[in-house]
Image: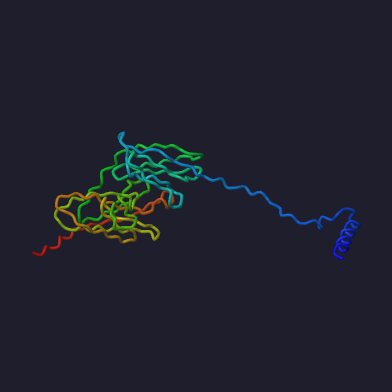
Amino acid sequence: MQKEIYAFISLFLVSCSGTPSQSALPSQPTFVPVASIPATPYIVAGTVQAGGVPVANALVDLLGTGQAGHYTFTRSDGSFRLVGTPQGPIVLRTGKWGFQTQVVRIVVDGDVIHNVTLEPGNVPQPLAIGASVGSVVKLDDTICMTSDPGVEDGDGGLGLVGPCKTFLLTIPQDGRLVATARWLGKDMYMTVLTPSHGKCCSSPLTLTFPVTTGSKVELGVSIHASDMLPLGATAPFELTTTLEPSAPVDR
């Protein structure tokens, strides 16, 4: 009976159109080719040196991407590799405490070799204890970092890294140095740091640590996660310092 019904339907369709109806044919899925987005696993690699000597632990990162993760640090031989660099024009920043930061624009249309030579940085601005100073941090300022293990990202000299304004303080007597920074901008995170002490992130920010008579302290006020900021971003701030006397030793 089923075969007779099927034959009747087929005969009806043929008689109406003269040819088998397309609607009677089984439907087939139609695959529309979609243009794939080309992957950009490009690598920007090179070496960083100063005076012919490799510079280890220098920051190498991309600016203005609005995304985290496009950064690395140079190895002991000064070499670096940035993997997954986006295609097109990029802004590459390289720097380390004590050197002038280098910012260059390059075009990535494949793997790129880019070597960097750093020049000595400017002498830190002298700052008298008890005085206040106003200044502005820019993305191409000296790169500062701290090895303080007690703060966010503290990791053997690679923690709390970012561009900074630096100041030099001469300590007149033993005590505890108190450095306080204040700045504007709700979305701006900053740090106060030395090579071995650091603190992040919201204003006002106070860093306190012991100091000894006659020592010199290079103190930096830095932008935290500066690679996330748009090009041209700046961070105005005010820095004040005081010296607290050492606590008496019980005998």
Left or right: 137, with 41 as reference point: left
Q: Provide residue 195's location: percent of width, then percent of height.
A: 26, 50
Q: Provide residue 117's location: percent of width, then percent of height.
A: 35, 37
In which quadrant of the rendered view does residue 4 lie? bottom right
Foreground residue among 191 and 80: 80
The structure residue drawn at horizontal position 37% and vertical position 41%, both measured from the top left corner, is 102
The structure residue drawn at horizontal position 68% and vertical position 50%, both measured from the top left corner, is 32
Quadrant for the C terminus in the image: bottom left
Q: Provide residue 196's location: percent of width, then percent of height.
A: 25, 52
Please count the marks in the image.
0
Foreground residue among 158 and 118: 158
In which quadrant of the rendered view does residue 201 lie? bottom left
Residue extending farthest to the right is 15
In the picture shown, does residue 17 fall above or below 80? Answer: below
Quadrant for the N terminus in the image: bottom right
Q: Provide residue 160's location: percent of width, then percent of height.
A: 33, 53
Left or right: 130, with 39 as reference point: left
Scheme by which the image is coloured = rainbow
Left or right: 186, with 29 as reference point: left
Residue extending farthest to the left is 251
The structure residue drawn at horizontal position 46% and vertical position 39%, both measured from the top left corner, is 106
In which quadrant of the rendered view does residue 11 lie? bottom right
In the picture shown, does residue 87 fall above or below 2? Answer: above
